[in-house]
Image (spheres, coloured by chain):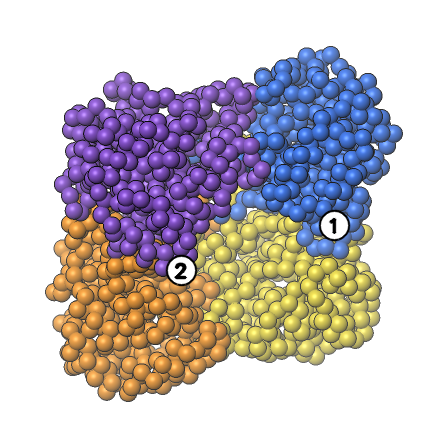
Chain colours: A yellow, B blue, C purple, D orange
Amino acid sequence: MLETTIGGAKRARIGYELDDLSLVPSKRTRGADLADVSWKLDAYRFGLPIMASPLDAVTSPATAARLCELGGLGVLNLEGLWTRYEDPEEVLGEIAQLTPGTDATVRLQELYDEPVKEELIGRRVEELKAGGMAAGSLTPGKVERYHHAALEAGLDLLVVQGVVVTAQHVTDEDHEPLDLRSFTARYDIPVVVGGVASAKSAMHLMRTGAVGVLVGLGASSVSTTEAALGIHVPLATAIAEVASARSRYLEESGRYVHVIAAGGIGTGGDLAKAIACGADAAMLGRPLAAADEAPGRGAYWGVSAAHHTLPRGRYDRVEPLGPLQVILEGPAHRDDGSVNLIGGLRRAMGVLGYESLSKLHQAELVVRAR
Amino acid sequence: MLETTIGGAKRARIGYELDDLSLVPSKRTRGADLADVSWKLDAYRFGLPIMASPLDAVTSPATAARLCELGGLGVLNLEGLWTRYEDPEEVLGEIAQLTPGTDATVRLQELYDEPVKEELIGRRVEELKAGGMAAGSLTPGKVERYHHAALEAGLDLLVVQGVVVTAQHVTDEDHEPLDLRSFTARYDIPVVVGGVASAKSAMHLMRTGAVGVLVGLGASSVSTTEAALGIHVPLATAIAEVASARSRYLEESGRYVHVIAAGGIGTGGDLAKAIACGADAAMLGRPLAAADEAPGRGAYWGVSAAHHTLPRGRYDRVEPLGPLQVILEGPAHRDDGSVNLIGGLRRAMGVLGYESLSKLHQAELVVRAR
Amino acid sequence: MLETTIGGAKRARIGYELDDLSLVPSKRTRGADLADVSWKLDAYRFGLPIMASPLDAVTSPATAARLCELGGLGVLNLEGLWTRYEDPEEVLGEIAQLTPGTDATVRLQELYDEPVKEELIGRRVEELKAGGMAAGSLTPGKVERYHHAALEAGLDLLVVQGVVVTAQHVTDEDHEPLDLRSFTARYDIPVVVGGVASAKSAMHLMRTGAVGVLVGLGASSVSTTEAALGIHVPLATAIAEVASARSRYLEESGRYVHVIAAGGIGTGGDLAKAIACGADAAMLGRPLAAADEAPGRGAYWGVSAAHHTLPRGRYDRVEPLGPLQVILEGPAHRDDGSVNLIGGLRRAMGVLGYESLSKLHQAELVVRAR
Amino acid sequence: MLETTIGGAKRARIGYELDDLSLVPSKRTRGADLADVSWKLDAYRFGLPIMASPLDAVTSPATAARLCELGGLGVLNLEGLWTRYEDPEEVLGEIAQLTPGTDATVRLQELYDEPVKEELIGRRVEELKAGGMAAGSLTPGKVERYHHAALEAGLDLLVVQGVVVTAQHVTDEDHEPLDLRSFTARYDIPVVVGGVASAKSAMHLMRTGAVGVLVGLGASSVSTTEAALGIHVPLATAIAEVASARSRYLEESGRYVHVIAAGGIGTGGDLAKAIACGADAAMLGRPLAAADEAPGRGAYWGVSAAHHTLPRGRYDRVEPLGPLQVILEGPAHRDDGSVNLIGGLRRAMGVLGYESLSKLHQAELVVRAR
C-alpha cells in the first residue's frame, strides 16, 4: 500500500522506517569473506561504504584521517567548533562534561555563538589534506560566503547539508539563495548534497550536477526536528524513493548519482537494510561518536541542538564502544549489532547470497504486520 | 484506506492522530522569516493562529490581555471559576496545591459546585474588554440563560463549546435546546462553535451561521472522555474531514468558515501538522498552562474534571516553561518543541516552502506504517 | 479489510479489540437523561444491561440480590465455592489474603479440589430466589449431572458457559456431550450459552433454542487462555460477527436472541462500545469485583485460575472502588471511567444522539490507524 | 494483504509473528483427551511433536535420553561443548555463574575457542544411542569434516543447521560447500535441514532429499541476528510459506517432508499456533532450558552468542520451571502457559475441535488489527 487518505480528503504516503523491515534470505548463500563492500564516489574509491557525519562530536581532522586509513570518509563541519575556535579541544572538553538537559542546551547555544572564521576554514582543510582526503560541509546559505577559503586550501569534496535542501530555492533566512547548478558548473569539486527525502526533490538535486545525495532529514537518535517542526520522512521509504529517482536520472543522463543514507543508522543490521533499500553508502553519527577517538569524548549532539532560538536536537551521552576500527570491523564482544558494523554487513551479504553492495539492492524485504 | 469492516458486518472509518503523520518537504524551500502566520476570523485579524482554551488553568482576564498583545486570542470560560467566585485567586491558589488523584477530583467537584453568577459574567467581560478583545465561552445548554449578561457587557466573540455540539439538537439534560441558527440571526456577535469531528456535523454547524468551528472532542492530554464514554475521533482525521466540509460549504455559500483545531496540540510540530491537515488556527490548553502567567500556577485541568457525577478529565501538574511570549515565540532553551511554537511553525513553513497558513494546507503528508 | 493472508497460503481474519475503536458522534445530540438503558431477556426486563459474571470473586447470593435491586442480574457459579463449601466465607477470606503468584495458584487448585455437592446447588438456588431472580451457571459437561438439583430448587435462568461452547459437540473430557437442543426442548427454563466468537458457531447455538449467547472467550484482564492455548478472538470483532448472526437468525426464525458481551469490559466507554458493536448487554467481572460488597474482598480470579493441570488465569488484586451502586450509577470521584459505568453509557448515548440500546447499535465507529 | 511497496519502488512482503495471530474456535469442540499429538519423522514415530534445540544450554546426552523417554527428541550440538571438552560439566558450571553482559560474551568466546575433537563426536553419539535415539547437529560447513565420526558411531538422525541454509550453495567462509543432494544420496541417514524461511528456498531444500526442514532463522528470545545482520522473517509467515512448499513438493514427488518450527516458541499457545500455521512439530530452546535437568543450569545462550568476531545472541538467565516432564506435560502451577506445553496443545485441539496435528493445520486464524 502506497498511500492512504486522511479524513477522506487529504492524501498521505505510507512510510517505513528501517526498523519496520527485515531482510529475507534468497535461495543462495555465500561466504561472508567473498563480500565486496567497496564503492566509488566520483573519482574516489572507498574500501568501506561509510562516511562520518559532519558533527563536532564525530569528525575532527584526526578522526577523518583515521577513517581514511580504514577505507571510509570523514566529513568535517566547516561551520562547527573547528572553524569557530583556534583550538577547540578545550571547548570539546567542556562540552563532554555537560549534563543532558536544558543547561546543556543553553551552554551549547553560547559556545556556538562564537563566529566562524574564514582563516580557520582554510587551516582545517589543510589539516584534513595532511591526513588524506579533505571533505567538509557547509550549509546552503553559507556556501557562497565560505567556499573560497575551503577550495583555495584544496578541499577535495564539498558536502552541502541542511535539514532539507532543494534545488529550486536553496536559501536560509539571512542569505542569498545558492544556485547549486551554477556552483557545480563553476567549480571542478565534486558536491554531495542533502537532506532530501522524496523522488521529485532528489531528481531536481541530481540535475544540479551533484555526485551524491544525502537521504534523510537529520533524523538521528538525538534529533527533535519532528517534535519542533512536524517534518519527517521514514528513512526506508526515503531511501527507496531517492534510489528510484537515481535510476530514472541514470536513464535520462547516463550519470549514476550516489545515494547516501544519513541519520538513525546504528547497527550492522541497519546498515545492511539501508543498502538493501537502495543506498550506496551510509553517513554515520552516533556509532562513530562511541569510538575511543571521537572528539565528542562520550557526548553526542547534532548541529541543531545549538540553534539560538529553536534547538532541535538533544545533547546526549554515548557509551564508549572501543576504537574506530573495532566499531567498524570488530572483533565485537557485544551482542547487539553496535560493534563490527562492517562485519555484520559482510555476513548479511553472505547469508543473503549477494557479492557486492549493488547486488544487495536486490534483496527481498519483509515488513512486520504491526 | 478510508474504511474497514469489523466482524464482516460493522463498518468503521480509519482514524489518524497528528502523531501518526509527518510533514514531507516539497521541491522548494523558503526563508522562515518570510512565513506569514496571520489569519482573520470574522472582522478580526490576528498575528498568530493561536487561541487560548477557555480553561481556568489557562485563561484569565490578565492572560487574555497578554495574549492579545502578542497577537493571539484568549477565551475566558464564562461558566468557570471567574464567574463563580468574586475573587477566584484564592481558589486558584488552593487548586494549584492539590495532589493529582481522587482527592483532587473531589475538591474540584466541591469548588465548581459554587453557582455561576450573572453579575460576574458582565464584570469579567468588561475586564476582558479593558485588556483588548473580549472572547468568552458558554456551553450550549447555558447560552440562552447567560448570553444577555455577556452581550450587554460588550462581548466581542462567543465560543459555544461542549464535548460535542451539533446543529440539529443542541441541548444538555437540564435545559432547553439552543437553536444556534436563530441565535446567530438574532445577534450580530460572531460565534465559534464546537467540538465537532465529522464532515456532516460540521456542515450542519456551518449552516447555522457560525464564523468558526472547533475541531476535536476535548481530547487533550488530560481528557478521559474516551475511557468514560468510548467517544473519540483522532484529530488529524477530524481536521481533514471538517476542512473538506469547509470547502464544500464555501462552494455552497461563498462563506469561508474557519476551522480551529482544539485539543492535544503540544508542540510546534503538532501546530504545523494541524494546519497542514486543514486547520486555520489552533486552540491551545496545556502549552499555555505552562506559562509563567498562567492562572493554573503549575496545575492543569479541564472543565470536565470537575463534573459532579462523571468526571472525565485528570488534574495534572505541568512543568513551567517560561513567559507566554517565550512559549509562543522563543527563544527556546528546550529541545523538545514545547517552547517557541510559532518559531517552529514558521521554520516548518520555510523548510516546506509555504509562505502562508492557507498554502500550508497543501503540504504533503506521510504516515508511519506502524 | 476483512482478511489477510499469512505467507501467501493461510488466510486470517482481521480482529479488533474494543480498545482499537472509538465511537463517533452523529449529527444529533440528546440529553443523557433521555437515554433508556433497559433491556429484556426472555420474559424478564432489566433496568440495566448488566450481568455479573459467574465468578466466586464477583457473585454471591447476596451480591446477586443487590444487583437485582439495582436492575441488573447476578449469575452464581453453580460449580464454584458456594456449592463446594457449606460456608464459603472462610475460604473466601483466606483467598482474599493470598499474594499473587504461583503460591496463590497452588492454593486455589487445592481449594477447588473440594467436590461440588448437589445438595448445596439446591440450597444456593433457594438463596438466590429469596433475593430476587435466580440465575446460575454450569459448564457444558456438568449440565446433565447438576441441572436437576438447580431446576427443582426453582432456577429462573441457566447460563451454560465454557471457554468455548459449540452446538455440535458440547463436551468436556470426562462427560457425555450435552445436547443443548434437546435440553432446551425438554425444559421451560431460558438458557444463555457461550462463549462463542464467530457468526457460524453463534448461528448453531441460536438454533438450539438459547435465549441469549455470551460473546467472548473468557478473555478478561486476568485470563491467560491466549498464552496457554493460543486461542483468542478480539472482542469487538466477535460481537459484530455474532450480532450479524443474530440478524440472520431473526430473519430465519422470527426470534431475537440476545447477545451478551463477556470479558474485558472495564469502563463506561467499553460498555458503550460493546453495545455499539451489537451487544444487548454486558457480563462484567473485574469492575464488580471492585465493589465493597464483592465476595472477592479485593481479590479477583477466574474459574480457570484453579485448573488442576493447566491454570489459565491469574489471581490478582483489585482496588476497591465503592459500593456496587456507585460503580454502576455513580457519583464518581475517579476520572478514568471505572466508576459510574451506566452514567458513562447514558452520557455516551446522549452525546451520540441515541435514545435506546438498540439504536446505539447504529453508532458510527472509527479505528485508530495504528 | 500479501505485499506492500516501500517508497513506491521496493516491494516487501507482509510478515506475521505468532504473537500477531490467535486461533479461532470452529463450530465443533472435542475432549482434550481425544487429541492425538504424535507424529512421524522418516521411520521414527514420536509421542510428542517436540525436538530439543541443539544448544549446550538445552541438550546433553542425559536430557536427550530423558526427552526420548517422554516421547520427544533431543538433538545434541556436535560442534558444542560436548565435543570440545572431554568433560564439559565443569565448563557448564562456570557458564551458569556468568552475569549477563559483555563479560559473559567474552568468556563464551574464550570457552568456545577450544577446538572440536572428532574422537568426542563419536563418543557422544554412543552416549546418545545408549539413551535411545541419537540425533546430532552439524553446521553446513562442517558436515563433510565431521559426519564420518558421527555416522560410524551410529548416528540415527543428522540435523544440518545454520542461521540460513540453502540448497544451491551451502557454505561458510572457511570450507568447501556442502552438496546436500549428494550427501543424502550417499548415506542412508535421515537429514533434517534449516533454517529456511521462504517457500522457494524450502522447495530447493526438500528436493535435496531431506526428511524435514527447520523453519525460522534462529530468532529465539536471545537472538540478536536481526540487529547485527538485519535478517529476519516473522515466524508465522515463514511456517505458512514453507508449509505451502511442502504441499507443492508432495504433489511433485509424492514425498511428505516434515516442517519443524524453530525459535521463539515459549508457551503452549505458541506451540498450537505454530502447528496451526502448518508445522508438524516444534524445536524448543528456552522452555527446555528452564527444566531442572537442563545442562544450562539456569542459563540460556545460543551458539551464535560465542561467535569470535560478531556475537549475535545474548547470554541470559532463565527461571527454573520444574522437571522436563512437568514443563511438557504438567501439572502446571503457573498460569502463563510456560508449563504443560503439551497439555495446552491438547486442550487447544479440543477447544478447536481437531483430533490430530495434521487436522490442526486447518484451524482458522485471526490477526489483531494493530
Q: Is residue A285 left or right of residue A182?
A: left
Image quarter (top left, top right, bottom left or bottom right) of the C terminus of chain D: top left
- The amino acid on which the numbered mark 2 sits, given as a three-letter code, is His
- Between C172 and B192, which is closer to the camera in this rendering? C172
Above or below — where is D117 with respect to C46? below
Where in the figure is residue D62, as x and y percent of width and height?
23, 76
Report the Cα–Cα distance between label 1 and label 2: 45 Å
Chain letter for mark 1, please.
Answer: B
SS type, badge 1: loop
For the point 28% across and 36% down, which residue is it? C124
Q: Residues within 10 Å of mark 1 (few under 14, many from 20)?
A: some
Q: Is residue A121 left or right of residue C290?
A: right
- The amino acid on which the numbered mark 1 sits, given as a three-letter code, is Pro
Foreground: disc 1 or disc 2:
1
Above or below — where is C99 with respect to D131? above
For the point 37% across and 33% down, which residue is it? C64
For the point 67% across and 74% down, which residue is it? A297
Where in the figure is residue D227, as x and y percent of width and height?
47, 64
For the point 52% across and 72% down, which residue is it? A339
Where in the figure is residue C230, as x and y percent of width and height?
31, 50
Say the numbered circle drawn on residue B320.
1
Where in the figure is residue D176, as x and y percent of width and height?
30, 77
Quarter of the figure with residue D255 = bottom left
The answer to whether the residues at label 1 and label 2 have Cβ atoms under 8 Å apart is no
SS type, badge 2: loop
Q: Say which residue label 2 marks.
A: D232
Q: Is residue D169 left or right of residue D12?
A: left
- Between A192 and A301, which is closer to the camera in this rendering? A301
Tell if the residue under mark 1 belongs to the same chain as the one under mark 2.
no
Instruction: Please say whether residue D184 is visible from this viewpoint.
Output: no
